[in-house]
Image (cartoon, coloured by chain):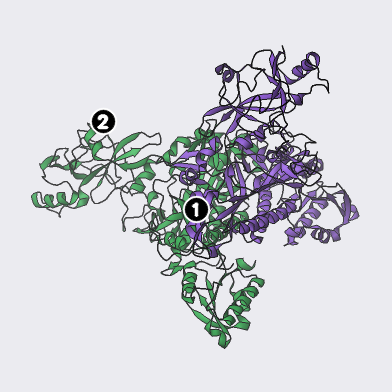
Chain colours: A purple, B green
Amino acid sequence: MRMSKLFVRTLRDDPADAEVPSHRLLVRAGYVRRAAPGIYTWLPLGLRVLRNVERIVREEMDAIGAQEVEFPALLPREPYETTGRWNAYGSNMFRLKDRKGGDYLLGPTHEEMFTLLVKDMYASYKDLPLSLYQIQTKYRDEVRPRAGILRGREFVMKDSYSFDVDDAGLERAYQAHREAYIRIFDRFGFDYVIVAADSGAMGGSASEEFLAVAENGEDTYVRSPGGYAANVEAVTTPVPDPVPFENLPAAHAEKTPATPTIDTLVDLLNEAFPREDRPWGAADTLKNVIVMLRHPDGSREPLAIGLPGDRDVDTKRLEAQVAPAEVEAFIEADFAKISTLVKGYIGPGVLGSENASGIRYLTDPRVVEGTRWVTGADVDGSHVLDLVAGRDFTSDGTTEAATIRPGDPAPDGSGPLELARGIEMGHIFQLGRKYAEALGLKVLDENGKLVTVTMGSYGVGVSRAVAAIVENSHDEFGIVWPAEITPYDVHLIAAGKDEAVVAEAEKLYAELQAAGVDVLFDDRLGKVSPGVKFKDAELIGVPTIVVVGKGLVDGVVEVKDRKTGDRENIALGQIVARLTVRLPASAVS
Amino acid sequence: MRMSKLFVRTLRDDPADAEVPSHRLLVRAGYVRRAAPGIYTWLPLGLRVLRNVERIVREEMDAIGAQEVEFPALLPREPYETTGRWNAYGSNMFRLKDRKGGDYLLGPTHEEMFTLLVKDMYASYKDLPLSLYQIQTKYRDEVRPRAGILRGREFVMKDSYSFDVDDAGLERAYQAHREAYIRIFDRFGFDYVIVAADSGAMGGSASEEFLAVAENGEDTYVRSPGGYAANVEAVTTPVPDPVPFENLPAAHAEKTPATPTIDTLVDLLNEAFPREDRPWGAADTLKNVIVMLRHPDGSREPLAIGLPGDRDVDTKRLEAQVAPAEVEAFIEADFAKISTLVKGYIGPGVLGSENASGIRYLTDPRVVEGTRWVTGADVDGSHVLDLVAGRDFTSDGTTEAATIRPGDPAPDGSGPLELARGIEMGHIFQLGRKYAEALGLKVLDENGKLVTVTMGSYGVGVSRAVAAIVENSHDEFGIVWPAEITPYDVHLIAAGKDEAVVAEAEKLYAELQAAGVDVLFDDRLGKVSPGVKFKDAELIGVPTIVVVGKGLVDGVVEVKDRKTGDRENIALGQIVARLTVRLPASAVS
């Protein structure tokens, strides 16, 4: 392909709405273009990259015997109604009506459709195991589409589903997918981690995520020295043993004027009510945070979270717990409606379904029986001290909503956690029988008895991978594509208008193509200077840049490695052989 | 691929809703499966065929220098609002709202988006000519989705667009596409015709369709001995010269009781008012048909068509004239509302915007000044004779709504027309400047002056092609795939449970695969008889069927040509060489 013909315009300036490097670079280098919020057009360069990602996924899915199908994106309501997801998806799902008033949706994921298809076609244990997949455009009406194709509303996913008669079969299918995913992400050429995952609104049990390691990632994950790794949403808090409370002092309310925050409260406690053993700390206080849940049916419900005062509510962790409800802020107008809430001094005295506010009250797992807390007295300017859990108050249950901090213990005892960020690139689930039961997918087993099929569900973010690869592989000048992903193998530059340069570059272009090398040839004449061509090449990110220019008088061309920046002069007679040797396996297969 | 593993179930019975062979066979042979009305899932066999069709289209588009991009299917309202198509598409377009209430549509075709993209990126005549294309899932909320994937509501299309500074450039781009389409349809391996087309709601001027010749086709086209060829929607009626009417008798109303139809009227005329020169015929009568137009904004408008009584209104021809309005029946309730209409005896006396009914009245081009008609007198049981057009009545204009009949003259004088049916597979348009003007796509020309770009628009029905190919190539036993389209090159059957048969078939399967042949291997054991395997092979339609069976004792296998039915015994030692020679070019490339 010639740059003089390629449908591309590189941009010197970052797009105004771009927050992350992949978004900036993919737009500036002419890979994608925004069509609407969270909805992008793939330009020729971008489409080549996307196809390479698809090819890798397809090859590895085929290699484990999964068979490719393609479902529609426009789906009827009924199957999703049956499993409850028509409502559970809430406003994350695009819904529409056809001309006859029938209800349809744009598929966010296809568990129902695959289940029904297999039910329609298969009837015996002999037909199983079966794995099916599709690489397909999917839709999710994100609250905050952001970061270009990293979190879009229309995106390409590979989703696959396994069907087995028994749990051992599901485990095998899960492991086969896990290994295929390892090969896929290795070939994507980026750093990634496999972490335990929350299974969210999908139901099911065992579930792991493949996260691309990335500072700008939306997901936070933890790791311990002993090998524990989990998405922060899935981390559970080790529950302390209950404390005997027979000899503890009685709870007593105290005046604590002007202490609406944990910090002001702790300062006052240390001044007015000093402890003998040690100073008061934020962890001695019980902070009560109220949020508003928005349920899929649109109804809103306040929820109070009681947690140690040295921690905050992590909205993503809380949302994983309350899914499919979404978490919204509890605003002034909401406070105004519930007169028993004294802002800044809310305590368990009014919280809980059975108490004055009637607000459901969930506490952190650390709030075990016998623990003593300083917390709001539900009176302006007052707190209660020595309030003992299980003696003086109870909650409606516990929840995992508190922030995880570096140094927190791993739930499996494998040591202190460290935190890092990543981009969710793959998710593998042991769904189990939830969908098969809801939709009646049964087969006859060896004894002629009907048994419910057990399923796995496995996803890879295909269009997202393009962005994640760029997040992982770029520098200040532009993108640096891995060998299997790059839109072209070689970026050939004719550096200068000199007739000999142009002729030699044209000759090399023809020779490289004849040798099976995919070449992007910057043949632009006119006002396009060598400097502009170099800059465009760095921005576009093809791994090998070949410059035909000044060296020609010495019979050499320059070969530059985009990643390392290493340059080398290669004799004209050797250049084709040299570049075909340097090619990745995929390009010569 | 082994039949024992392939996700397929062939069906002995036709699906209840299948009217045409391609629908019946593609469902029965396990290529596609219905997910909702007009919305289909591609099973593994079907997806392989679809990909082959896509590959051919892609190769030929690339060959003319068109560059592939991919637009979203979910599109914002604004560009379609600007060009008026948000309304013009009426209920054929799927519309939806996002969570913020923004208006979106599922793209039926992408003129607006391509125009805006090029406007966004290009600014000079030096950037042109440019041709872009995409192979993409599209949506149209058909009134009557039918015939499986032949007319679906979600379907795959290739759409491309050319951009030029002047008309000569557009003409070149149009011809390049026309030639690419000829290569594409040749490779699809079916009979097709290229006909002049009506450009419908798309606007623009020159426009041709590629129709697959098919009895079950929804489109009717005409051909003349002199080479005229057109979709029936685009055929124009030669307008006769006006007739002097100075000496014609005055119009006179006559009692014509019980003549609500043309036939009864003609009989009565010949009995009660015989002509001297010849008997009365249906062509002497002026039939007035009333239909109801539904405009894109939902409003309804009655329309009267006056045409010779020996012809009917062809709804598709009329719809091409009144687009974007749709044509609906004018029902009893509609009649009841307009008291001046006397059913069975409606005449030009009350029709027309200026007359009593106020109904817009369009006449056939044959109703020229001076022609004499027998038509309704707007009184029950009465007709008017000797009613002369231009003297006794006028209309609001003419329209091309009458049926075309074999033997009608070609509009270019090239002889009598013959009629046949086809499936619209491709459509090429010279759009001109309509979209570029509406959306402001201008470039600087050589003199530094802003000029509006001229565009072409070109479509191929990609998923429809799969069905059209089957319509064109099947027999009573099943599908017969052309070489470039078939999901596999060879269908290998192990005919029998004999150990030697199974072993030899397995060996041949391995050898053929090693030789680069795509093989579908029917390795099923158990209750699957050779008879069932033969039937499945015929149904599935792979062009070459190889049977390892009884011949093995003589060291031969049978090779059957699915199309001709010819069978040949080939020695085991020669079979691989023989089948690799027989392979189509595409499979060995």
Position of residue A510 measured from the top left corner of the image (x, y, whole percent)? 75, 58
Determine the image quadrant of residue B450.
top right
**Closest to the observer: B208 or A587?**
A587
Determine which residue is flagged by label 1. Answer: A116
Q: Residues within 10 Å of mark 1 (few under 14, many from 20)?
A: some
Give the residue at the far right of this rendering: A554
Q: Tags 1 and 2 in contact by the CB under 8 Å rule?
A: no
C-alpha separation, residue under disc 1 versus residue under disc 2: 60 Å
Observer-side mark, 1 or 2, equals 1
The answer to whether residue A519 is visible is: no
Considering the image in quadrants, where does the C terminus of chain A appear? Answer: bottom right
Position of residue A384 measured from the top left corner of the image (x, y, whole percent)? 69, 18
Position of residue B506 measured from the top left corner of the image (x, y, whole percent)? 61, 75
**Closest to the observer: A330 or B66?**
A330
**Closest to the observer: A518 or B513?**
B513
Position above or below: A33 against A510: above
**Closest to the observer: A352 or B131?**
A352
The answer to whether residue A266 is visible is: yes
Chain identity of mark 2: B
**With A518 as the anchor, is B78 left or right in this view?**
left
- Residue A431, disc: none
Determine which residue is flagged by label 2. Answer: B354
Position of residue B206 measured from the top left corner of the image (x, y, whole percent)? 48, 47
Name the residue type under label 1: Leu
**With B394 as the anchor, is B214 left or right in this view?**
right
Give the residue at the far front of this rendering: A246
Report helix, strand or loop for mark 1. helix
Determine the image quadrant of residue B341.
top left
Confirm whether circles 1 and 2 share one chain. no
